[in-house]
Amino acid sequence: MPDDITRYELPANRNTLLGYVVRRMHKTKWLASVPSLISGGKFEDALAQVAMYAVTSSTSFGRAYYQPQFNPVGAEVIETDPLTGAIVKAKLESSSPTYLISYCVDMPNGDVFSGREEITGTTVGLRGLGMPAPSKFNFTSGNYSVDLTGILTSELVLSLIGRTRIRAYGFLNFNDNTGNTGKLTLDRNKYINLEVNGTAMERQFA
C-alpha cells in the first residue's frame, strides 16, 4: 500500500527532512536475511538483498502529504525500525551548495549499512519536479562487504487538488568482496531490473 508507506514516512505530526529519511530507511527487513545467505554461501543472493535495501531505503512511492521541515546543519535523527530493531541514524552534513545527508543502520546482529546522498538541486520537467541524488553505500557483515554507487532521483508529481505524489527512478552499480558484480535500474512505475553477474535476479519493490 504505497499511501500507507508514505503516511508512515510523513506522519500527521509534520516530520522533518531527517525524520523522513530515517522513516524511509525503515525497510531493514531486506537486510535481516543476509547473514543466513552468507553462511550458506549464497553470496549472489546476499548481494541482491543489499542492493534491494539500498534502492528501497532511498526512495518513496505514494502520496506526498507535505514538504518536510528542514533541519539545521549538524542535526541528527535516530529511530529504531520497529520491525527488526535496527537502529537507523541520519545526519545533515551540509545544506549549501547541496544537501548532503549521511546515514547508518546498525542491525541487531552487528551488521552495518552506511551511506550518503547528495541532493544536487531540483529539475523541472513535464513529468514533475526531480531531485537527483548521487549516492554511495557500504554494507558489512563479518568479513563480507558490499559497495554500491549510483544516482536515484526522487520526483514530485504535482496536483492542484492536493494529491501530489512522490515517486523515483535511477540506477545502482554494486559489487562485493567475493568477486560478484551487479547493476539495478528502477523506473517510475516501481519496476526493478536487477542483475548479478549478468543474470537477472527476481526481486520486487516492497
Image (cartoon, rainbow, N blue to C red):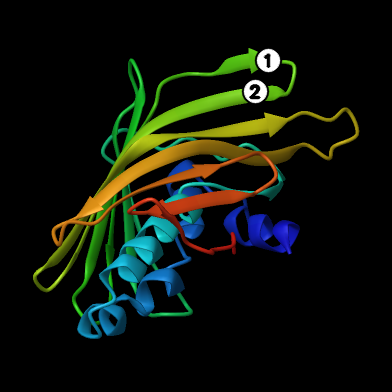
Amino acid bearing label 1: Gly
Mark 1–mark 2 contact, CB under 8 Å?
A: yes
Q: Residue furthest right?
A: 161
Residue 19 seen anywhere in this rendered image of the structure: no
Helix, strand or loop at disc 1?
strand
Mark in front: 1 vs 2: 1
Q: Is residue 194 left or right of residue 41?
A: right
- Picture layout, residue 184 above or below residue 72: below
Residue 136 image point, x, y percent? 28, 41
**104 to the left or right of 3:** left
The residue singled out by tag 1 in the image is 125
Is residue 146 positioned above or below 75 on the image? below
Given residues 25 and 40, the one toward you in this image is 40
Q: Position of residue 205 (x, y in %)?
A: 59, 59
User: Where is residue 155 drawn, in percent x and y?
Assistant: 62, 32
Q: Position of residue 38 (x, y in %)?
A: 23, 78
- Report the residue marked by disc 2: 129
* Residue for point 25% across, 54% down: 114
> The C terminus lies in which quarter of the figure?
bottom right
Residue 133 appearing in the image: yes
Indicate the amino acid at tag 2.
Leu
Query: Gap in Å between the C-alphas at discs 1 and 2?
Result: 6 Å
Residue 204 found in image quarter: bottom right
Q: Indicate whether 193 appears above or below 26.
A: above
Tag of residue 77: none
- At mark 2, the secondary structure is strand
